[in-house]
Image (spheres, rainbow, N blue to C red):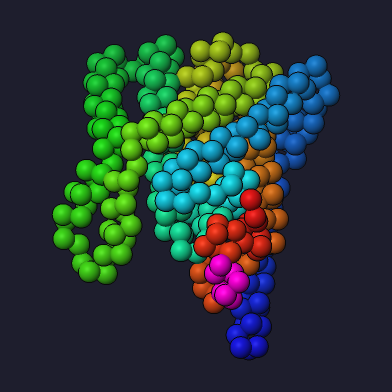
Amino acid sequence: MVFRFFRAKWANTLIKIVVTMALFALLYYEVFHREDAQQLSTLLLKQWQTSDWWWVLITILLLPLNWLLEAIKWKKLLSVFCQIPLLRALNGILAGVSLSLFTPNRIGDYGGRMLAVPAQYNWYAILATMLGSYAQLLIILGGGLWGVMYFLNHYSDWPIVIYNGFWWLAFVLLGLAYFFFFNIGLLAKLIKSLQLPRRFNFLIHYLYKVRHFNSEVLSSALLIAAFRYLIYCFQYFCMIKFVGIEVSLVGAFSCITAIFFIQSSVPLPPLAGLLARGEAALILWGHFSDNKMGILAATFGLFIINLVLPALLGLGIIVKINVLKSLGYEHQTIEDRLNIRNGNSSDGIHASK
């Protein structure tokens, strides 16, 4: 028993060390070690000393609302299976941001949110996260299609027949995506009917649980996702104004939504996605301004505010918890089992209501 205790303790410590080192190494390499890091930071500091400093202040003030809405959305979806306090949901969200920075397609986000629920609800946490990401993706694709078409119509020399054909095809596919979102149980039945190998049975079992999500819960998740999207777009607009790029609100939002649309199509971790977003930003914003450093500084600054700062908070949360216990790999005491049945825990994210 003592040996098992120390083995689990060392395993927890090792996991936390690896996560901390991986996060700081990637932040250093992708953020501070990039060739133009000095120029970007100098430009941002210079702009902060001008009368436009309040634009970045608005961006920072909107940060808590952005992630609070994501916590509310996830809590709403998770409530179909279990109830957790909003603060615990927010802690799980921040832990997920920390892990997702260095994992492909934000896979680490699932791991972080699993830490916010009792171990027996881990798969339900993943299911709620998947559905929440689906809702957010629908909003990004819808807004992005509008942005791409508006941009092509007003700022591109492409033949009109090309993007008109693309318009109809894209919205038919988007309509199908919305149909399956509000009929998610039908999609689960289709997957279950595929007769997949037995080793996938447990995944199909949990996936089939999506039939418990009703239209009210799904509509709420979609509405919250839309509010998050508007906030994030407005934050980007504020950063563009902060670096001194003059552009109309409609023109700016067409660029911003198109950039998010492009980024959502690239299955890369956010740190690598920063490069893809920067390249897309240079191409699209280049129609309004030749201030390349300002364009990159706005993208870089938004990344620091909306992802790096929450990731550092999330890392602090991960360091404080018993990771193995949260993931169900450590045997729990009788007292812990009773606490979990009551919806409480004294460990880490599992703070009492």
Image location of residue 6, percent across then percent down: 66, 83
251 left or right of 235 in image: left
Could you tell me what secondary structure mostly forms the magenta stretch?
helix
* Pick the front one: 278 or 351: 351
Residue lying at 59% horizontally and 76% vertically, measured from the top left:
333
Residue lying at 79% horizontally and 31% vertically, measured from the top left:
45
* Residue 325 part of the magenta-drawn span: no
Classify 180 as above or below 270: above
Q: Which residues are magenta?
A: 332-338
The quadrant of the image that shows the N terminus is bottom right
Residue furthest to the right: 49
Residue lying at 63% horizontally and 67% vertically, measured from the top left:
322
Number of on-image labels: 0
| Residue 31 in view of the camera | no
Residue lying at 66% horizontally and 62% vertically, measured from the top left:
346
Query: Residue 216 lies in what quarter of the image?
Result: top left
* Residue 337 part of the magenta-drawn span: yes
178 left or right of 300 in image: left
* Pick the front one: 151 or 128: 128
Image location of residue 210, percent across then percent down: 32, 47
